[in-house]
Image: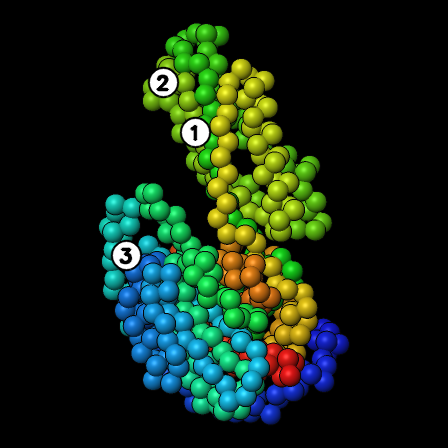
C-alpha cells in the first residue's frame, strides 16, 4: 500500500459546498459511537445466512422507521431500503451495507460470540460474521441516525440499502446474488451515485483505503469435464487417459498468467481447486472433472482469460484424443470505482480520516457484489481499517476464517466518512 501524498490537488471549491455540516456530523458520530458498537455486537452474536436475515432486517427496518423514513422491506427476499428525504431539492445518494453471515464456526472467545447454527449444503455448521458485515450494518444504521438529525439541511435525499446475500446463494437449482436481485427489482433507478465500504482486517483501524478504477476482482467458476477411453491400468496404450490429459491442461493454464495477461496493468488468478477422477488403483477412468475459480479485473481482461482457458483445455484434450467440456459460470463482475467520482471523493476521505490515514491500496483479488450497483450508476467503494494498530497484516486472521476479528474503534470513522460522502456529493450537484 502507498500513502496518499496528493489529496489536495483534487480539492475544489465545490468540495466544500456543504462543509458547514461536517462539524454536525462529527458531533453526531461521537454521540452514536457506543450505540453503533452495541448494534454490531448484537448482530455478531446473532448472525444469519444469506436470504435468511430476518432478525437483522427487522431491527434495521424498525430503526429506519423510528427516524421517520419511508421503508420498504422484503426487497430481494430480505433486503431493507429506507429513503431519507432532505429539506431541499437535490440528488438521490445511495449508501449500501450487506447483512449476511457465513457458514463458519467461530473460535474467538468473546462475550458476544456467535451462538447461531444452521444447516448449509446438508451439513450442520456454526454461523459467523466472519467477513464483517455486522459492522457494515451497524455503521450504516449510525449514518442513518446522524443524517436524519440534519435532514432539513440536506440538499437531496439519501437511500439506505441494506442488502441480503452478498456472499451469494448456492443451493441445488438456485444461484443468486443480493445486489444483482436488488438491481433487477429497481433499487437503483432513481439513484445518482452510490457509496459503500467494507471493513478490512489487514488495514489499521483509523485508516481508509481505496483505489480508482478496478479495485476488487470479478469472480467466475470453472467447471471442466475431460472424457477419454477407459482401460486397465496395466495396458495404458488401450486408453485415452483423461488423468494425464487433465494434468497437462492444469499445467497449461499456468501460461495464461505468465504469457497472456499483461501483469503490469492488473493481476489475474486461475486456480484449480479440485480434481476428481477414477475409483481404483488399476483402472484408468473414462472421465476426470476439474473445478476452480477465476479472478480478473475489468471486462477486457476477463474476456481474454476466459478465451485462453477454453482454448488451452480444449486443444490439449484434442491433441490427446480426448474431449473437453469447459464451462465458465460468471458470478460477480469486477468492482470498479468510477474515476471521476473517486477524484471528487478523495477530499471527503481526507477530511474524515486525516491526510496520513488515507491509503491507495493494491488490487484485491477478493470479489464484492457491490459491482452490480456500479454497473447501473457511478459508485465508489472503500475499505475501512479494522486491524489493531501495530500488528502485522500478514499474521492477522483473514476474512472468512473462524478467528476473524476486527477492532471497533474504527467504526466512528466509517460513520463520518459515509456521511461526508453524502453531504459533499450533494454540495457538488447544486
Q: Residue, x 65% and y 69% (percent of image)?
A: 342
- Which SS class for mark 3? strand
Number of marks: 3
In terms of image quadrants, where is residue 214? bottom right
Q: Earlier in the sequence, mark 2 or mark 1?
A: 2
Colouring style? rainbow
Q: Which residue is mark 3?
A: 126
- Which SS class for mark 2? loop
Q: Taking 275 as reference, is 399 above or below it?
A: below
CA gap, disc 2 and disc 1 = 18 Å
Taking depth in this image into account, of 387 and 19 the one nearest to the observer is: 19
- Does the CB distance between marks 2 and 1 fall below 8 Å? no
Q: Which residue is mark 1?
A: 289
- Does the CB distance between marks 1 and 3 fall below 8 Å? no
Quadrant of the snapshot with the C terminus:
bottom right
Q: Position of residue 9 (x, y in %)?
A: 75, 76
Q: Position of residue 320 (x, y in %)?
A: 55, 17
Q: Earlier in the sequence, mark 2 or mark 3?
A: 3
| Dot in front, 2 or 1 | 1
Whether residue 367 sits left or right of residue 127 in the image: it is: right
Amino acid at each position: 500500500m502507498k500513502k496518499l501524498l496528493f489529496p489536495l490537488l483534487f480539492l475544489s471549491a465545490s468540495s466544500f459546498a456543504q462543509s458547514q455540516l461536517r462539524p454536525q456530523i462529527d458531533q453526531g458520530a461521537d454521540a452514536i459511537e457506543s450505540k453503533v458498537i452495541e448494534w454490531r455486537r448484537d448482530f455478531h452474536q446473532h448472525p444469519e445466512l444469506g436470504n435468511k436475515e430476518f432478525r437483522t432486517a427487522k431491527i434495521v427496518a424498525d430503526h429506519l422507521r423510528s427516524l421517520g423514513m419511508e421503508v420498504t422491506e422484503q426487497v430481494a427476499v430480505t433486503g431493507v431500503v429506507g429513503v431519507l428525504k432532505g429539506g431541499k431539492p437535490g440528488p438521490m445518494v445511495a449508501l449500501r451495507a450487506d447483512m449476511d453471515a457465513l457458514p463458519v464456526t467461530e473460535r474467538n472467545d468473546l462475550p458476544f460470540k456467535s451462538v447461531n447454527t444452521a444447516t448449509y449444503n446438508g451439513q450442520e455448521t456454526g454461523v459467523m460474521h466472519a467477513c464483517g458485515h455486522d459492522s457494515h450494518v451497524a455503521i450504516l444504521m449510525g449514518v442513518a441516525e446522524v443524517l436524519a438529525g440534519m435532514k432539513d439541511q440536506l440538499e437531496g435525499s439519501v437511500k439506505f440499502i441494506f442488502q441480503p446475500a452478498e456472499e451469494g446463494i448456492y443451493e441445488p437449482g438456485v444461484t443468486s446474488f443480493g445486489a444483482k436481485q436488488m438491481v433487477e427489482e429497481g433499487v437503483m433507478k432513481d439513484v445518482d451515485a452510490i457509496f459503500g465500504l467494507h471493513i478490512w482486517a489487514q488495514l489499521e483501524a483509523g485508516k481508509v483505503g481505496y483505489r480508482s478504477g478496478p479495485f476488487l476482482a470479478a469472480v467466475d467458476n470453472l467447471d471442466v469435464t475431460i472424457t477419454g477411453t477407459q482401460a486397465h491400468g496395466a495396458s495404458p496404450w488401450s486408453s485415452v487417459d483423461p488423468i494425464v490429459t487433465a494434468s497437462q491442461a492444469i499445467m497449461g493454464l499456468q501460461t495464461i498468467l505468465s504469457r497472456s495477461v499483461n501483469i503490469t496493468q492488473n493481476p489475474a488468478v486461475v486456480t484449480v481447486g479440485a480434481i476428481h477422477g477414477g475409483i481404483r488403483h488399476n483402472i484408468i477412468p473414462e472421465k476426470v472433472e476439474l473445478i476452480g475459480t477465476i479472478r480478473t479485473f475489468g471486462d477486457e481482461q476477463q474476456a481474454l482469460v476466459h478465451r485462453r482457458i477454453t482454448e488451452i483445455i480444449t486443444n490439449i484434450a484434442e491433441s490427446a484424443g480426448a474431449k473437453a467440456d469447459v464451462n465458465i459460470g460468471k458470478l460477480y463482475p469486477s468492482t470498479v470505482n468510477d474515476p471521476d467520482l473517486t477524484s471528487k471523493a478523495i477530499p471527503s476521505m481526507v477530511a474524515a480520516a486525516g491526510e496520513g490515514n488515507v491509503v491507495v491500496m493494491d488490487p484485491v483479488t477478493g470479489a464484492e457484489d457491490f459491482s452490480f450497483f456500479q454497473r447501473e450508476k457511478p459508485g465508489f467503494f472503500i475499505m475501512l481499517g479494522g486491524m489493531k494498530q501495530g500488528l502485522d497484516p500478514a499474521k492477522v486472521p483473514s476474512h472468512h476464517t473462524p478467528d476473524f476479528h476486527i477492532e471497533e474503534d474504527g467504526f466512528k470513522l466509517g460513520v463520518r466518512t459515509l456521511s461526508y460522502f453524502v453531504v459533499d456529493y450533494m454540495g457538488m450537484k447544486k
